[in-house]
Amino acid sequence: MDTLIGFFTQLWERLLPYLRNKYLLTIIFVVVWLTFFDRNNFIDRVSLIRESHQLKNDCEYYREKIVNDSARLVELHSSPEMLEKYAREQYLMKKDNEDIFVIVDH
């Protein structure tokens, strides 16, 4: 217990001259204020930057998806056979004289 008190006493004596420096205290206060308490603090800025990168990646993904779907749509409108194939595969549509068997992989 005495060594712990002695350690903190030595630490306090070493830090006391620095804590009397008003410029250092001002810098420490500004850094703490900007890191935690300011409306645009550093912690929120980092999370917003990460979110921005994620949204940019999502935007690229959806642009590629739009291009692919547009090409597929043009393909479906250009050929009745492709439209029939798509309806059979996606919506399980059939002709009157056909039976459909759905095989599900587990």
Image (tube, helix red, strand yellow):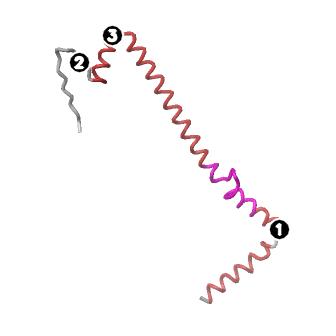
Q: Which mark is residue 44?
A: none
Q: Which residue is mark 3?
A: 80
Marks counted in the figure total: 3
Q: Which mark is residue 94?
A: 2
Label whose residue precedes the other's in the sequence (3 or 1): 1
Label 2, residues with CA under 10 Å away: few <14, some 14-19, many ≥20: few
Q: CA distance from mark 3 to mark 1?
A: 81 Å
Residue 102 location, quadrant = top left
Disc 3, SS: helix
Mark 3 in CB contact with mark 1 (< 8 angstroms): no
Q: CA distance from mark 2 to mark 1?
A: 83 Å
The residue type indicated by label 3 comes to Pro
Is residue 19 shown above or below 106?
A: below
The residue type indicated by label 1 comes to Lys
Tell me: 77 left or right of 81.
Answer: right
Q: Residue at x 43, y 22 (%)?
A: 69
* Span colored in magenta: 28-46
Q: In this view of the protein, which residue sits in the foreground, 102 or 1? A: 102
Task: Work out which quarter of the rendered image holds the N terminus and state it.
Answer: bottom right
Label whose residue precedes the other's in the sequence (2 or 1): 1
Residue 58, position in %: x, y? 51, 35
Q: In this view of the protein, which residue sits in the foreground, 63 or 40? A: 40
Q: Which residue is mark 1?
A: 22
Outermost residue toward the front in this view:
96
Residue 5 location, quadrant = bottom right
Q: Residue at x 30, y 23 (%)?
A: 91
